[in-house]
Each structure stands twice: as C-alpha cells, then as structure tokens.
Image (spheres, coloured by chain):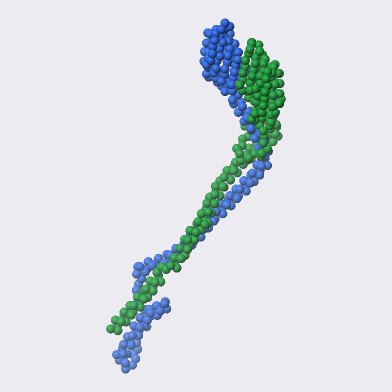
Amino acid sequence: MGLATESSIKRQKEMKVVNEKIKQTRLTFSDLIIPIASGVVLIVLSFAVFIPMVSSAFEYLDEIKVTNEKIDQLEKLDKQLNLLDENQLNEDVLTSRRVIPNILLVTSFVYYVDELATDTGLEVAKIEARDALDGVSGPLEYSGVYENVIAFLDDVQDVSPYIIRLQNVKVSSNDEEVWNISLDVSGYYILDTNEEPNIYASFQLYTEYSDVVDIFKSKVEEF
Amino acid sequence: MKENVKVNNQNPTTNSAKSAPAQKQQQAPQQPPTPQPNIDNTSKEGFNLIPAMTKEEKVHVKKKNTLNIGSVLSLIFLAVIALGIVGFNITAKTQLNRRKSVLAKTENKINANIDKISSNNIILDRVKLYLDVKSNSFSHRKIIEFLTEIGERIGGISFRSIEISETLTFEISGKAPTLERLSRLWYLFGVDENVKTINLKSVSKGEEGVSFSFEGEFDIKNFSNE
C-alpha cells in the first residue's frame, strides 16, 4: 500500500516536472512581441517614410533623366554656337535687317515702290498704303506701255531689296498703246523683341540657309 | 521552481536508496548497522526518471527557437529595408544634385553666348519669312508673256484685261477676229499643261470681231519664282 502511494507520488512529481518543461517550451506572448512590433513598425514606416521616400526617389530618377536630356541639348547647342563666326554673324544680321527691316515705314515703302515705277517709265494713277500685320500694304495703280508694265512686275518682285508680295494683279488696256496695272503690294518687316531667347527652344543654324543669305546680300546691293 | 525540480530529480534515487535500509531497520531494529551495498555507484550513474520528450514537445521547443530567430530576422529585415530605401533615396538625390550642377554650368556657358543665339534667330526669322513669301509667289510677267505668246501663235488675238489673283485663278478678256480663232484659243488653253482649268465665260460677235472672256486657274509649276 505504501509502495503504491510512493509510486503515485513519484509519478505526480514526474508529471509536474514534465508539465513544467512543457510550460517552459510553450510560446508565450512575450516571444511574439518583437516580430509583431517590428511588423507594426515596418507598416507604419512604410506609410510614413518608405513610400514617400521611394516615390520621391523615383521622381529624382525622372528628374535626372530630364536633366540629362537638357544637358545633351545644351551641349549640342554649344557645339552649334561654336560653329558660328561672330564677325560674319553680325554682318549677316545687318544684311538681313536691311532686306526685312525691324520696322518698315509706310512712307519709305511707298516711296521705294513709286520710285521703281517711275524709273520704269510708268505714271502714277493711284497710291494707297497702310500698316498691316507685320507689313505695309496698299493698292497701287500705274499706267504705261506694255513693256514697262512687264518690267515693273519683274523688278518689284525680283530686284526689290524688300520682300514684296503682289496680290490681285490686274493688267488692262484701253487701246493698244497704254496699259493700266493695278495691284496690291505688301512689304514685310519683323519687329525684333528685346526678350532673351529661350535656350531650350529648338535651335537651327542660319548657315543652313546660306543660299537665302546670299540672296539677301545681293538685294542689299540694290539699295 | 527549477531548484525544486532539481531537488526532485535527485530525491527519487536517494530516496529509493535510503528507503530500503529504513525498511530493513524497521524489520530488524536491533541489528547492528551493516555496511550498505554500493548504492553510491548506482547513484553516480543515475536513473533518468524524466521521460524523454515527446514529438509534440520537440516541436514546441523548435517552434520557440524558430520564433526567436524569426524575431531577430524580422528586425534585420526591417533594418535592411530601412537602410535600402534611405540609401536609394540619398543616392538618387545626390546623383540629381550632381547632374543639376553640371546643367547649371552648361547653362552659364550657353548664356555667355546668348547674343549669338539672338543674332542667329534674327536672321533665321527673316530667312523663314522670305521662304514663306517665295513659296507661294509666282511671276506675273511669265503669265502675261505666256498668254501673249498663245495669242500670237493663233494670230489676231488681243487681250484687253488680264486679272490674276494670289491663288492663280485668272480672268482674261479680249478680242478675236473670228469664232474659229477663238475656239482655237479655247482649245489651246484646254490642252496646255500650264492651265489647270479653263472656262469660256462669255462670247459675243460684233462687227469688229468676236469679244470673249475666259476664267480659269493656272498651274504654278512653270510660273513659280523659285
């Protein structure tokens, strides 16, 4: 009887020890605190810091891309500018400004056209001129012999130092000798602005149009 | 608690060793104490009375170790993520700042030559205007000479008025000696490559001949100023 109670006590004690062991190895809340806390911190940081930082980093990358493009563009522009000879450039500016002036006075233009007509032997019938958008235009009427009318049409377009556009040309004759010519003449000018040019705007070297610049030079010689 | 367990662990062996002589003492209390069998030897080797861990217990222990490692790993992961993102951000920002400083230098270099750009643009604007005006311009002289030449080819044709618009539409009127010559003129206008369209607008026959007026459109190809 005594042995039975002793063995049961032993067993109980052994069970107690085993239970203690099991308790020791069982997961407790304290074991999960760090992973849960780090997870929560990760989530909070993600929304508060990481996501804004990553998005701003991507914005930086985009900006780097744009900046690199701008640098490439400016380097290309710099190379193009180095191709221009400053003295020649200034000379060509003066030439082109004489052909298409900064401002074209109505009186100057009409005076020039009228002088051209009288030089070719035509007589004035009507002169009207006014300021128009980026130009001067007006109806003109002259009369003269057929050859002079033709010569005037030629000169006013090709020989004129100004850039001139002829519109609504009407040539008529009442008899075989005298021809009347009526036309709308437009002369152009470009009002230069004092604004500094945008260095990022597309740039083209004027020397690509050297043939036109040569025409300008030949027109200037007509003055 | 652990101390208790230790005590308990030792007790069963000592208790069992001690309990046997105690029983014998109870049975023969008057006998002199005899030397005890070598109980110490057995107690040195010991009996493991704690049962071996079951599979479940092992899993529990493993789980706990894993979770402890997991917490360490989660902290490392957090730190790596934080460092990675911050590093990425700083690197990108630094790189951007470097490129911006390069851009600023290049801009300064270009701005030093801004006059060249202005002068170039002044010429270029004028060149473009010239080309624009020239692209749509045509020689009125060539057109008038073309009409006169056709009239002379037929003979007896005289033009009274020639009206040419900017879009190359025209209206001409004149006189022909006969209807036959007028029809020939009409035919020549119709087949000539320089005339796109031709329409005999009016015709009248009188004592002095035939009066006519045409309207149509020229082709700029052969009259262009370029």
User: Which chain is depicted blue?
Assistant: B
The residue sitting at 65% across, 42% down in the picture is B110
Q: Position of residue A212 (x, y in %)?
A: 64, 28
Q: Position of residue B12 (x, y in %)?
A: 35, 81
Instruction: Specify the colour of chain A.
Output: green
Residue sitting at x 66%, y 30%: A189
* Position of the N terminus of chain B by quadrant: bottom left
In the rendered image, the residue lying farthest to the bottom is B30
Residue B93: tell me if it is visible.
yes
Residue B103 in the image, given as x and y percentages of width and height: 62, 46
Identify the residue shown where x is 61% and y is 37%: A203
Q: Please tell me whether residue A6 is drawn above or below residue B67 in the rendered image.
A: below
Tell me if residue A218 can be seen.
no
Which is more toward the observer, B139 or B211?
Answer: B211
Left or right? Give the position of B122 relative to B57: right
Q: Nearer the viewer, residue A85 or A178?
A: A178
Residue drawn at point x = 67 percent, y = 15 percent:
A144
* Numbered circles on residues, count: 0
Q: Which residue lies furthest to the top in this view?
A: B207
